[in-house]
Amino acid sequence: MVWWGLRRTDRAVPLPLVGQCDERRHVLRTDNFLFYTPRIRLDTVVCTALASDPQAQHWLGWGRDNIVADPETREVLTFLRPGELPAELPAELRDAFDPPRDGKERLVGVRLDDGRYAADITLDTDSGEIGAVFAPHTRGLGLGGELFRAAARLGHEHCGLPLVRARFEAGNAASARALAGADFNPAGSPFRFTLPAGRAVHCRWSEHAIAVGTSCCEAGRSTPRTPRLA
C-alpha cells in the first residue's frame, strides 16, 4: 500500500458534533481539540500510527506486532485530516467501525486549528485506567494537561466513573507534568511493571476523582460506578 502516493485532493466528510453521544459513541470538545469515538477503520489505524514512533514507544513499549513500523506510513497517516479524506484512500479504511462492547473506550482527537489527527485516548471502564498520547506534531506545545483533562471527562462525564487513574513511568517527567496540570494526584507507592515489549520499569499511579460520575446518555440521572482497582 503506497501511503505516500495519496494526493491532497480531498473530499469533505462531516465530523461528529458535541452532544451526539449514545451508549457506545462519545464526543467531547476542549479548547484545542475535538475528541470522538472512531467512526471508520481509518480512525483506529491512525490511533495506532500516532503512537508508533520511537519516542512514544520508549515509554509505551508495545509489542512489535502492535505498532505501525514504517516511518513513511506513520508520517502520512498522522498528517491526514479526518474531515477531508483523500480520494485514493483504500476502501477498507472507509468501512464503518463498530465499537466493541468490551469496556474499552477509545477517542481519537483532532486539532481544531488545522483539522489533523492529533491524539488518542483510551479508557478501561472496569479498572478506570486511562491512557493518552499525542501525535508527534502536537507534542511539546504545552497541551498535555488539556489531553488528560479530556481523558478524565470521558471517564467522569460520559462513562459514569467517579475515579480515573493513569499509570506512568517514574522517569517520564512530561507525563508527570501533564497529569499534575490536569489536577491528577499521586496515588500509592512506585511499583515494578513489565511493558508488552519486555522492558521492566518503575511506575507510579496518578488519580483524578469526583464525588459522583454521570453518564452522558442518561440525562438528569447519575449513574455512579466503582472502578476495579488492581
Image: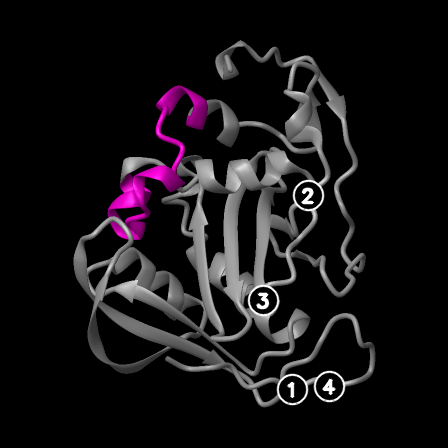
Q: Answer with mark 3 or mark 4, whichever residue precedes in sequence.
A: 3
Classify 10 Å Cα crowding around label 4: few (below 14), some (14-19), many (20 and above). Answer: some
The residue under label 3 is 103
Contact, mark 1 vs mark 4 (Cβ under 8 Å): yes
On screen, residue 199 versus residue 34, left or right, reads left
Question: Which residue type carries mark 4?
Answer: Ser
Q: Answer with mark 2 or mark 1, whichever residue precedes in sequence.
A: 2
Q: Answer with mark 2 or mark 4, whichever residue precedes in sequence.
A: 2
Question: Which residue type carries mark 2?
Answer: Phe
Q: Which element is circle 2 on?
A: loop
Classify 10 Å Cα crowding around label 2: few (below 14), some (14-19), many (20 and above). Answer: some
On screen, residue 138 versus residue 151, left or right, reads left
On screen, residue 159 versus residue 58, left or right, reads right
The residue under label 4 is 222
Q: Residue at x 78, y 71 (%)?
A: 217
The residue under label 2 is 97
Q: Quadrant of the C terminus?
A: bottom left
Please report the bounds of the magenta region as a residue range: 55-74
Up/down of 121 relative to 118, above or below: below
Residue 173 x %, y %: 25, 59
Number of numbered discs overlaid on the protein picture: 4
Secondary structure, magenta segment, majority class? helix
Question: Which residue type carries mark 1?
Answer: Pro
Q: Residue at x 18, y 61 (%)?
A: 201
Nearer to us: label 3 or label 4: 3
Determine if the magenta segment contains residue 57: yes
Mark sitting on residue 224? 1
